[in-house]
Every structure is written in structure tokens, then in C-alpha cells.
């Protein structure tokens, strides 16, 4: 038996919408099988994992807290990926943004001005952007592959953070815990509603998603992203600069990742510590693809992947399964999304007979 | 169909051969006979089904129905390997060569795996010499010219001792002199009793060397004849069906100011496989069509890039557009000065296949038509309606056949997309238009339309540069002709004064038929002064 | 003392060399598999689990190879049969591999490992210095050396290797010549996965005979950089792999020296050295666009759909 692909003349609009849903369905089936193999009841486990976290308000807040950085980073990544710039180091830009954004509260714990929070956010964005500027510079000036450089920088950023919180930034009254003093109240990102912990981060995420959707859909800039991603040569013919696009997309996604970083530290954690992210920068890649690289789609997929984190925590509590099962689900989602995306560009045919020359095949 | 004068038992016999892609019949019940020691032409214009037919004969595609017989026995050809084993060899129009490997390695890949590489190298050297197409087995393909690469393909086919060799448009990449050498080789093959299936759309060649011809149109056989007993017009009618409009041209336009000038431009090659431009100079006036003839791979794309501004040059005065030095100016700056550009590659350069026609319109005119197509100042919001109506206007002006109001560029046929791309520029009434290969891979009707449009543009007072590999086209529309060879440009000659033989010599690298030797930079300057228009 | 350091460098370099060699073969056939990290960690956990359950480190090696190989087939199916984007699929493989291995390895955390014992080659191991360093090593080291020379021979002296290089140069032309592009690429991907799995096995059976989550610590990515650095040539992979291994060991020793000498160099800075070195090396090798173009397999990463 052989699988044969035939390119479609026009990409299928039907499958553009169906593909992510099909991928999710397949993930659920695979997940059910996995739960079964772990000795748990499949349907009950799926319920605990995917449905229970949606049932109370407090949990929905947690969902928003997890979705915020995912959406924020992923919309930036969608612009990068669409323009054929593969920023894999968003996790590092998130970390550096968290660090630069925390400079003010850590070094000036007694400063109580209302200015401190906006400054923190701006500094976080600048930090993330500058850190993303490194792979951008290496790509444009030295022709170096941005996947590998941005990735190496992730490890470097995490080591830097580790050194900071164990060394110069450690709270001297903190019983030797590797973390900073808790931020003063003015430096904490406020909650949006009283019913739970969700902070302004989710608002930033939605604004960023809408703004980037507008840009991609209506502005010349979005057109440039699209053209350069599909053909650098055609982009050059149009007078669009691929070099400038590297900078634009990397700085933009770095800034958004940095904003996500400082929002997480300031809104969700309240101080700086060695581990500030359960891999948001990498999970955001999955969010971007599940959302089909469309900022509006990413809003939805951000919540779906946030759910996988919550589900993992719930599964750990109720089923005794380790929360690593979250990572497995996330990986499975990406796998199925990529598989189902084939249907958008190609028609799949299963050929059962070995071909013989005179037999008609159409 | 019965053919008179064909021997009773032909070498190859095809009956009712059909190939369907979905519901589209690329080949439709084709009958064909090729005799022993016969050079058989397969005629037809682009899209007629010639390539599909020979791909079936060579095992690259499988027929949907019909039979193929060799020496009277029906055969099945499931793969190129089997085709070779049956004694069928093929030289494709687009070579299947590996740049990073040597000549011997390339040939080894299509031969019996049991033969050691050293022996293949030896045989390559001797066979290539014997047939008048010498090759060095240890050379890397990346270093060879297009003509030499074709030799690899031919020698590779010959080493398998074929009874039938299929050649797909072989002379499209050769100088007239190299083509002569090829014809000698073909005569030698014929004398050995081998047969040749010769695909071409060049009627004079076919009449010269071919014994019989089969003509295809829209996948069906529309004629089988002895080409020597036909006229070019009758053959053309079998190929195209209706009369194709001849390009109408006034005998001479009055030539106006120099609108584009290139002054001794030299550009180093950007990539290891590119050609360096050496000391290029040219002038084009209002009302003039300057044609730059040359075989592919002699610097045409590099010249286009320098003139268009996709790759600006260091010397600002090297290129002067409407009196302004623009060497360093990028492409949109040059567009703003009234220039238009049509690159060679339709897909992935002049247009993006996955984008709609209106998007492709914006591609070339986002800067030049900023006021019409973009709104909102710095936000640069795209005015879809304005672009869409402009696209409609262009499609009707150029008679672009398409499905739907704003389909993707990829869904158009080559000819229709090219009409759109050329129309996209004409719509702006550019004072200078530079076109690279205006009708490559385009059907005769669209080609004629495009050529007429270029001639009309010049008549209206613009300066037009046409870079082309098609000498027939050049003679049809050019006022002046120059030849590019290995990155150097010859003197321009008035079109009426240049013969085919002279062009061939110029293509082969003899830069000035007046001096008969390769000219240096200083000689050029002297010659230019002497030939100043 | 020098001998002891050399031994640790060999142990540190071997997994890099093996993983990079596997990826080199994959990329020579035109496929870019970014999932090396994922395949390596799957190999590590598979090897450890097999060794624990059977008690034999040798069966553990087999487990690692099989684990990495099977996992790579997922990548192969998506990119070669379904023609999915190679970059995204490679990332998916890594994310899934890290998660799945963490899940599987949960049961084995903290268990003492089954260490792979060295095989002492008689006679040769009596040579002073070299005998101890080169000829008293474990099986995986010997395999790494065999791989370097075997792959070199395969690519440049064998018919099958010629075909593979042809595919990497132009898959369209290779297909036109009747070479089965997809099948060769599947084999290349499988080989790359098996090598990555073997490298992972080395980590959990020799380097630190234990299972720790994410124990590959980015080595898979460094292996990818190594392939670029070596311009897709096996002997250069050997050289580069040992260079990186030396940097890795060097920074560990520097940390110890600094502590004992009372010099306050942050350990994190030294730990960052291998990653910084990778970036520097990539810059050096890539910045000349001309040579990069000549060395890179021309069809690397491009999707291929055979027309029939």
C-alpha cells in the first residue's frame, strides 16, 4: 500500500478550519490510549484533564494566567515564522525580559511611585527585544542560522538568571533561598477581577493579538511579511528588504516575549527565582502552529494549550500521574497539527495495487 | 491513421496512448510510428503534450490507456531503468545533473551499478570524443557551460547503446555553431541505424534534419507528414490551428532621447554559480526596442538584476535612468522614475504562485502606486478595492483567461500569467521597460500578444530592453540587437544588419565581428566612439 | 593526570560525535532533522530502562538504538510521506521526546544504573598511554570510531553513498534518474535516529549511569551545530566533536580550579561556555556565504513530492 499526494490547485479553505480541530480530536484519542496504558480509565482521565479545569471560576483565572504568556509570545512568533525567520529562542527572550523588567523593583525596593510598573514593562520589552537582536544580528551580518543561535541563547539566559538569583540579587533576609525580595505592591501587575488571580497579562495578550491580526490582514507590513516568507526573491523584486524583516520580526517577537516574561514575574510570581517558566517559550511554538499562524486563531489555541498545563496539574492531584503528561500532550498536539496540515495543501490517495503500466490511474 | 512511405515493421509503435490528470487529457489517443534509422520530429507548441508523451515512453509517467510496441512486441515501461533496458534513451530539456558531483559520477548514477567508476570515466572520455562531443570525466558539473552539460546528458544516453534516443528541445540551449555539431552527431547516429525522436518547435531545423514529423495540438495528433514537403506555414497551422497574428511593426520609429544608459558596469558574481558582468555598456532611446540575444547562463539574469536595482551596484553613474544616475538606487526608486521590470521567472520572482492576482499586482506597485493603493499614512493600509479593479482592468486589457474573479497566480497557465505580469507594467505606461525572456514557455497566442504590446509601447515613445534566447522573437520585434556572452555585451547593431551567423559567432565569444578578436576594455571604448549613435 | 583528563574528554565527546554523524547522513540525503535532542533523550531513557529491566548494559545499548530509531520514523512519516514542514516537525519531535522520556523515565529516577564496562583489547591495550586511553574503552567508543570511518567510506567510496549525495544535491534530478528518493531518505532518517539513540545510550550507560530528566542538556542541538561546523564531512565531525568535548570538560575543571583557588568565577558562566562556543563556531563557519553555499547539500530542507 502506498500513500500518494496530489497538490491542490487552491489551498482548501475547508481544511484550513478543520485541520486544527481534527488534530485536537486525534490528540484526544491518543491521550485516551495513553491513559489506558497507564492503567487509568480513559474517559475519566480525559474529563479530569480537559473538562474539570473549566468548571470553576478560580480555575478559569488560572487558565487566563497560563494563556497570557502563551498568546503573547505566540503572536510574535507567528509573524516570525510567516516571514521565514525561525525564532526558537523565545524562552530565552522571556527570561531576559523578566530580568531587565525586574531591575527597578529589585534594586529599588523602596520606590513606591506609580511609574514603576509601566517602566518595568517597557524595560522588559526592551530587554527581550535586544536579546532577540543577537540572533538577528548574527543572521543578517554573519549568515548564521537563527534556529541554533537563538536556542543556545536560551541556555545562556537561564544560566544567567540562575547566577543572578543565587548571587547578586538574592534576598539577604531570605533564609538563603535563591530568590529576590518580594516586589513592592506598586511593582506587581494588578489583577483584573476579584474572583481570581488573573492579571493584566491576559489583557496585553489580547491587545497584542488584535493589533497583529490587524497588521497582517490590512497593512502593507503584513503583506511584506507574507511575501518575504514565501519567496525572498519576489520580496526583493517588490522592493521589500529581507534583512529589515529579520530585524522587525525578531525584535517584535523578542519584545513580546520580554513583556510576557516581566508580566509573569510581576503578576504571577511576585519575585524573581531560578525557574520562572514551565517552558512557555517552547509551548508557544505549538500555540502558533495550532492557531495556524493567525493571531486570532492563536487566541483560541493559547487557551487550549493553557488547558494542557492545568490538566497536567489536575491529573497529578486526582490521578496520581506526573505532570510531565502535559508535555506529552503538547508534543502530540503539534504532531497531529502538522500531519493534518498536509490535507490543506494536498489530496491524499491510498494506492492499494502495485502499479502496472497499462492500468489507468487517476 | 496510416502513414505512407513508412516501413512495414517500425522500431517503435504507439497506438491510442492517453494520459489523464484528473479529467484533463494531457495526451489523447495518440498514434505514432518511428522507423529504424529515422529521425522523427515531434512538433507542437508549449502545452501540446509533447513532454507528457515522451515521459511515458521513458517510463517517468504511466499511461492511462493505450499501447506501446517495440519491434512489433507490446511493452510495458514502468520506470526509466526499464526504458533504458529496452533500448530507449532520453535527453531532457531540463538536465538531471548534480552540480556537486563530477561528470563521471553523474554518468555512473544512470548506469549499471556493477561497472566500476574508473571504467565509466574511460568510456565517457572515448565515447564523447567519438561522437564529437568531448568531455573531461573528472570535471565538476558546476564548472561546465550549458552546452557542455548537455553533452553529459547525450553521452550518458549513448553509453547505454540505445536503439531510440529522445531529445527534448535540444537546441534551445545551444549556439548556432553548437547546434550544427549536434546535427552532425545525429546524422552519425542515423547512419548507425539508431532512431531519434526530436522534439522541437523550430520549424527550420525540423525541415533540415528530420525524415518524418508528427504534430500535436492540445494532446491530440493533428498531422503526420514529411516535413520537407511542407512549408513553415502549413506546419505552423497544424501546430496552432488558427492563424497566429503576425506582429505588426512600422518600418522605423523616430528615435528620441536616450532614456536608459549603462556605462562600463562590472559586477562580481554573487554566488559561485553566477556569471560576472564585465564592462557592460548600452544605450536605449525613446522609441527603440533593444534586444539582447544570448544563450541562457551568460549573464542575462545578472544584467537584469543590475538594471532593475534588485541588486544595486557600487558605481552610481554606472546606470543612468532618464538622465539621473541610479546605480545605487534600489528597485522602487527606479520604478518611481518611470521604469518597469519583468523578470524571467514567473514563479517565485515576478509573482508568488500562492498569492492572488491582486496581491501580485501590489507586489510590483506598492511604492509606485502608493497613493492609489495604500491609505492611512504611516499605517499603509491596503486598499483592496482599488487594487482589485486595477487587476480587472489589466486582465481585460491583456485578455487574461482565468477562473474566478481574483484567482491565485499559480492557477493561471504560463501564457496567461505572463500576460498579466507584462500588463501589470504596461498599465503604468513606463518610459523604460526591461523584460527578461518575455515569452519563454508561453503559448503562441499569448506570445504574439505580448510581443505586439512591447512593440506598441516603443512606438508610443518608451525605451524597451528585451533579453531573449529566442532569435525568431528578436528578429520580429527588435530595432537594435546586441549579444551577451560570458558576461560581456557586444556592440549594438541595427536589426536589419545582423545575420544569424554573426549572432552565432558573437554568442560563441568573438566579441566584435569587425575586429575578429576578443576586445579589451580600451578597444571597446574606441569602437564605441566609432559607432556612436 | 593528563591521561585522566583525556579519558573524560573522550567520554564527553563520544555522544556528540555519534549524534552528529547520524545527523550528517540524514542531512546529506537532503533532510533537516532538528529532532536530534528528542531522539537522543528517547534513546537515553530506552537504554536505561532496558538495562534496568534486563540487567545487561549491552541490551541497553540495543534498546537505545531501537528507541531512537523508532522515534525517528515518526519524523520520517510526517516529513517524507506527508511532506510536512521539516523545521516544525523536528521541533515537535524534540518537544514530544523530552515530554515522553520524562514520563517514561519517572519510574527510573534515582535508581543506580547499570554501567557499561570497558572492553580491553588484548595486546593493544598494553601499549603505554595509548593502550589505556584508546584500547581499553567501552563498546560505544569503538562504535563511534567505526562510524566515522564507515560513514566516510560509505559516502565517498560506495555506490549507495554516491546516490545519497546525488539526492542531497538535487532530489528532482535523482528522481528523474529513477533513484528512489523517499526510500533512501527514510533509511537516512532511520540511521540518524539510531545514532542519536546510541548517543543517548552512552549518556545513560557510560557518562552518568543514571536517569535524569532532560539529561541531554542541549547536546542534540550542539550536534546539529557540529554538522554545519564540519561542512558535512565525517572526519571533521570527529575533530569538532572532540573540540566541544574538550570545552565541556575544560569548563568543569575550570570550575573546580576556581573554587579551590578561591577565584570567584561564577559556575554558571563556565557552564555557559559550551553554548557560547557553539555560537562562536557557527559564526566562523557560516559567515562566508560562498563556501557555505558550496558545502551545503543543495536540497537540504526542501519538500519533495514525486510526480507520477
Image (cartoon, rainbow, N blue to C red):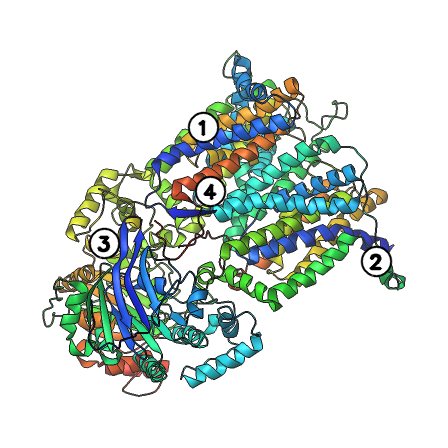
Q: Gap in Å between the C-alphas at discs 2 and 3?
A: 70 Å
Query: Pointers 1 and 2 in contact (CB under 8 A)?
Result: no
Rendered image: mark on residue B416 = 3
Q: Give SS at disc 4.
A: helix
Q: Mark 1, mark 2: which one is toward the viewer?
A: 2
Rendered image: mark on residue C133 = 2
Q: Gap in Å between the C-alphas at discs 4 and 1?
A: 17 Å
User: The residue marked by circle 4 belongs to what chain?
Assistant: A
User: The residue marked by circle 1 belongs to what chain?
Assistant: A
Q: Give SS at disc 2.
A: helix
**Mark 4 = which residue?**
A81
Which circle's residue, 4 or 1, is located before the other in the chain? 4
In this picture, residue B159 sits left or right of residue A152 = left
The answer to whether one can see residue B164 in this image is yes
User: The residue marked by circle 3 belongs to what chain?
Assistant: B
Q: Gap in Å between the C-alphas at discs 2 and 4?
A: 47 Å
How many discs mark residues in the rendered view?
4
In this picture, residue A227 sits left or right of residue C235 = left
**Mark 1 = which residue?**
A299
Q: Mark 3, mark 1: which one is toward the viewer?
A: 3
Amino acid at each position: 500500500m502506498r500513500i500518494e499526494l496530489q497538490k491542490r490547485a487552491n489551498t482548501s479553505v475547508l481544511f484550513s478550519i478543520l485541520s486544527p480541530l481534527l488534530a485536537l480530536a486525534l490528540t484526544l484519542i491518543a491521550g485516551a490510549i495513553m491513559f489506558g496504558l497507564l492503567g487509568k480509565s480513559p474517559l475519566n482521565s480525559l474529563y479530569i484533564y480537559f473538562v474539570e479545569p473549566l468548571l470553576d471560576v478560580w480555575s478559569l483565572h488560572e487558565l487566563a494566567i497560563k494563556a497570557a504568556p502563551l498568546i503573547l509570545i505566540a503572536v510574535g512568533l507567528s509573524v516570525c515564522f510567516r516571514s521565514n525567520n525561525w525564532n526558537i529562542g523565545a524562552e530565552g527572550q522571556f527570561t531576559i525580559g523578566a530580568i531587565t523588567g525586574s531591575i527597578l523593583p529589585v534594586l529599588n525596593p523602596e520606590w513606591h511611585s506609580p511609574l514603576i510598573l509601566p517602566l518595568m514593562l517597557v524595560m522588559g520589552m526592551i530587554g527581550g527585544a535586544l536579546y532577540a537582536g543577537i540572533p538577528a544580528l548574527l543572521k543578517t551580518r554573519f549568515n548564521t542560522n537563527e534556529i541554533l543561535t537563538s536556542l543556545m541563547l536560551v541556555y545562556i539566559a537561564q544560566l544567567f538568571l540562575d547566577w543572578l538569583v543565587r548571587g547578586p540579587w538574592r534576598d539577604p533576609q531570605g533564609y538563603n533561598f535563591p530568590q529576590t525580595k518580594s516586589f513592592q505592591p506598586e511593582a506587581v501587575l494588578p489583577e483584573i477581577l476579584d474572583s481570581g488571580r488573573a492579571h493584566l497579562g491576559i489583557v496585553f495578550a489580547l491587545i497584542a493579538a488584535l493589533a497583529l491580526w490587524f497588521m497582517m490582514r490590512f497593512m502593507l507590513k503584513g503583506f511584506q511579511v507574507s511575501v518575504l516568507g514565501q519567496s525572498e526573491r519576489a520580496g526583493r523584486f517588490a522592493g521589500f528588504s529581507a534583512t529589515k524583516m529579520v530585524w522587525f520580526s525578531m525584535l517584535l517577537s523578542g519584545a513580546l516575549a520580554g513583556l510576557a516574561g516581566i508580566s509573569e514575574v510581576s503578576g504571577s510570581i511576585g519575585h524573581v527565582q531560578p525557574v520562572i517558566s514551565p517552558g512557555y517559550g517552547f509551548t508557544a511554538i505549538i500555540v502558533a502552529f495550532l492557531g495556524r499562524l493567525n493571531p486570532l486563531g492563536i487566541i483560541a489555541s493559547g487557551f487550549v494549550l493553557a488547558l494542557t498545563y492545568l490538566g497536567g496539574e489536575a491529573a497529578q492531584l486526582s490521578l496520581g500521574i506526573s505532570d510531565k503528561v502535559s508535555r506529552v500532550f503538547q508534543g502530540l498536539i503539534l504532531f497531529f497539527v502538522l500531519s493534518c496540515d498536509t490535507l490543506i495543501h494536498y489530496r491524499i490517495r491510498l494506492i492499494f495495487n502495485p502499479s502496472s503500466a497499462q492500468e489507468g490511474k487517476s | 491513421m496510416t502513414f505512407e512511405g513508412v516501413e512495414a515493421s517500425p522500431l517503435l509503435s504507439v497506438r491510442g496512448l492517453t494520459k489523464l490528470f484528473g479529467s484533463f487529457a494531457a495526451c489523447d489517443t495518440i498514434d505514432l510510428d518511428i522507423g529504424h534509422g529515422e529521425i522523427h520530429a515531434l512538433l507542437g507548441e508549449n502545452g501540446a503534450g509533447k513532454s507528457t508523451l515522451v515521459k511515458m515512453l521513458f517510463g517517468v509517467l504511466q499511461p492511462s490507456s493505450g499501447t506501446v510496441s517495440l519491434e512489433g512486441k507490446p511493452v510495458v515501461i514502468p520506470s526509466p531503468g526499464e526504458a533504458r533496458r529496452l533500448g530507449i534513451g532520453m535527453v531532457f530539456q531540463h538536465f538531471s545533473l548534480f552540480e556537486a558531483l563530477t561528470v563521471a559520477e553523474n554518468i555512473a548514477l544512470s548506469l549499471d551499478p556493477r561497472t566500476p567508476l574508473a571504467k565509466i570515466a574511460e568510456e565517457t572520455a572515448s565515447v564523447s570524443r567519438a561522437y564529437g562531443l568531448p568531455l573531461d570525466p573528472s570535471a565538476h558539473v558546476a564548472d561546465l557551460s550549458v552546452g557542455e552539460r548537455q553533452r553529459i546528458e547525450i553521452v550518458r544516453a549513448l553509453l547505454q547503446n540505445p536503439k531510440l534516443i529522445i531529445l527534448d528541445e535540444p537546441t534551445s540551449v545551444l549556439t548556432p555553431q553548437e547546434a550544427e555539431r549536434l546535427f552532425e552527431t545525429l546524422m552519425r547516429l542515423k547512419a548507425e541505424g539508431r532512431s531519434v525522436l526530436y522534439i522541437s518547435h523550430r520549424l527550420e531545423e525540423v525541415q533540415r534534419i528530420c525524415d518524418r514529423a508528427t504534430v500535436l495540438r492540445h494532446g491530440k495528433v493533428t498531422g503526420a507528414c514529411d516535413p520537407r514537403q511542407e512549408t513553415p506555414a502549413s506546419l505552423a497551422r497544424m501546430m496552432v490551428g488558427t492563424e497566429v497574428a503576425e506582429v505588426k511593426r512600422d518600418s522605423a520609429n523616430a528615435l528620441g532621447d536616450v532614456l536608459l544608459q549603462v556605462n562600463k558596469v562590472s559586477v562580481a558574481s554573487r554566488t559561485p554559480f553566477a556569471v560576472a558582468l564585465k564592462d557592460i555598456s548600452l544605450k536605449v532611446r525613446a522609441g527603440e526596442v533593444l534586444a539582447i540575444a544570448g544563450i541562457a547562463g551568460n549573464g542575462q539574469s545578472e544584467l537584469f538584476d543590475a538594471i532593475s536595482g534588485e541588486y544595486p551596484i557600487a558605481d552610481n553613474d554606472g546606470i543612468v535612468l532618464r538622465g539621473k544616475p541610479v546605480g545605487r538606487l534600489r528597485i522602487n526608486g527606479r520604478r518611481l522614475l518611470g521604469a518597469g521590470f519583468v523578470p524571467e521567472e514567473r514563479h517565485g520572482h515576478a509573482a508568488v504562485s500562492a498569492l492572488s492576482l491582486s496581491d501580485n499586482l501590489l507586489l510590483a506597485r506598492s511604492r509606485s502606486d502608493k497613493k492609489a493603493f495604500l491609505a492611512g499614512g504611516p499605517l499603509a493600509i491596503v486598499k483592496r478595492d482599488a487594487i482589485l479593479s486595477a487587476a480587472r482592468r489589466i486582465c481585460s486589457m491583456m485578455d487574461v483567461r482565468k477562473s474566478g474573479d481574483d484567482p491565485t497566480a499559480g492557477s493561471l497557465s504560463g501564457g496567461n500569467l505572463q500576460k498579466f505580469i507584462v500588463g501589470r507594467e504596461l498599465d503604468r505606461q513606463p518610459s523604460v521597460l526591461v523584460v527578461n525572456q518575455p515569452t519563454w514557455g508561453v503559448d503562441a497566442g499569448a506570445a504574439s500578444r505580448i510581443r505586439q504590446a512591447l512593440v506598441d509601447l516603443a512606438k508610443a515613445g518608451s525605451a524597451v530592453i528585451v533579453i531573449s534566447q529566442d532569435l525568431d522573437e528578436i528578429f520580429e520585434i527588435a530595432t537594435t540587437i546586441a549579444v551577451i556572452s560570458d558576461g560581456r555585451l557586444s556592440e549594438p547593431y541595427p536589426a536589419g544588419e545582423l545575420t544569424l551567423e554573426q549572432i552565432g559567432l558573437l554568442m560563441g565569444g568573438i566579441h566584435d565581428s569587425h575586429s575578429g578578436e576578443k576586445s579589451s576594455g580600451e578597444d571597446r571604448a574606441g569602437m564605441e566612439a566609432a559607432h556612436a549613435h | 593526570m593528563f591521561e585522566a583528563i583525556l579519558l573524560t574528554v573522550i567520554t564527553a565527546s563520544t555522544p556528540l560525535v555519534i549524534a552528529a554523524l547520524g545527523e550528517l547522513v540524514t542531512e546529506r540525503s537532503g533532510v533537516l532533522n532538528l529532532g536530534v535532542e528528542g531522539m537522543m533523550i528517547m534513546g537515553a531513557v530506552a537504554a536505561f530502562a532496558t538495562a534496568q529491566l534486563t540487567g545487561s548494559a549491552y541490551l541497553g545499548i540495543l534498546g537505545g538504538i531501537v528507541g531512537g530509531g523508532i522515534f525517528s520514523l515518526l519524523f520520517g512519516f510526517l516529513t517524507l510521506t506527508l511532506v510536512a514542514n521539516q523545521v516544525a516537525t523536528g521541533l515537535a519531535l524534540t518537544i514530544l521526546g523530552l515530554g515522553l522520556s520524562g514520563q517514561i523515565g519517572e519510574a527510573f529516577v534515582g535508581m543506580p544504573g547499570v554501567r557499561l564496562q570497558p572492553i580491553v583489547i588484548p595486546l593493544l591495550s598494553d601499549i603505554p598511554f595509548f593502550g589505556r586511553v584508546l584500547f581499553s574503552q567501552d563498546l560505544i567508543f569503538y562504535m563511534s570510531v567505526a562510524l566515522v570511518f564507515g560513514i566516510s567510506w560509505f559516502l565517498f567510496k560506495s555506490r549507495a553513498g554516491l546516490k545519497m549525495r546525488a539526492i542531497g544535491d538535487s532530489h528532482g534530478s535523482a528522481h528523474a534518474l529513477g533513484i528512489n528518493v523517499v526510500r533512501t531518505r527514510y533509511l537516512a532518517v532511520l540511521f540518524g535516529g539510531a545514532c542519536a539513540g546510541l548517543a543517548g545510550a552512552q549518556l545513560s550507560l557510560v557518562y552518568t549511569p543514571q536517569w535524569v530528566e532532560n539529561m541531554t542538556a542541549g547536546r542534540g542541538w550542539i550536534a546539529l551545530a557540529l554538522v554545519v561546523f564540519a561542512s558535512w564531512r565525517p572526519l571533521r565531525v570527529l575533530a569538532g566533536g572532540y573540540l566541544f568535548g574538550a570545552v565541556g570538560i575544560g569548563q568543569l575543571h575550570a570550575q573546580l580550579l576556581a573554587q579551590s583557588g578561591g577565584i570567584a568565577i561564577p559556575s554558571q558562566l563556565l557552564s555557559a561556555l559550551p553554548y557560547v562556543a557553539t555560537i562562536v563556531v557557527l559564526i566562523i563557519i557560516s559567515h562566508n556565504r560562498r563556501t557555505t553555499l558550496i558545502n551545503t547539500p543543495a536540497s537540504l530542507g526542501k519538500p519533495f513530492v514525486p510526480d507520477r
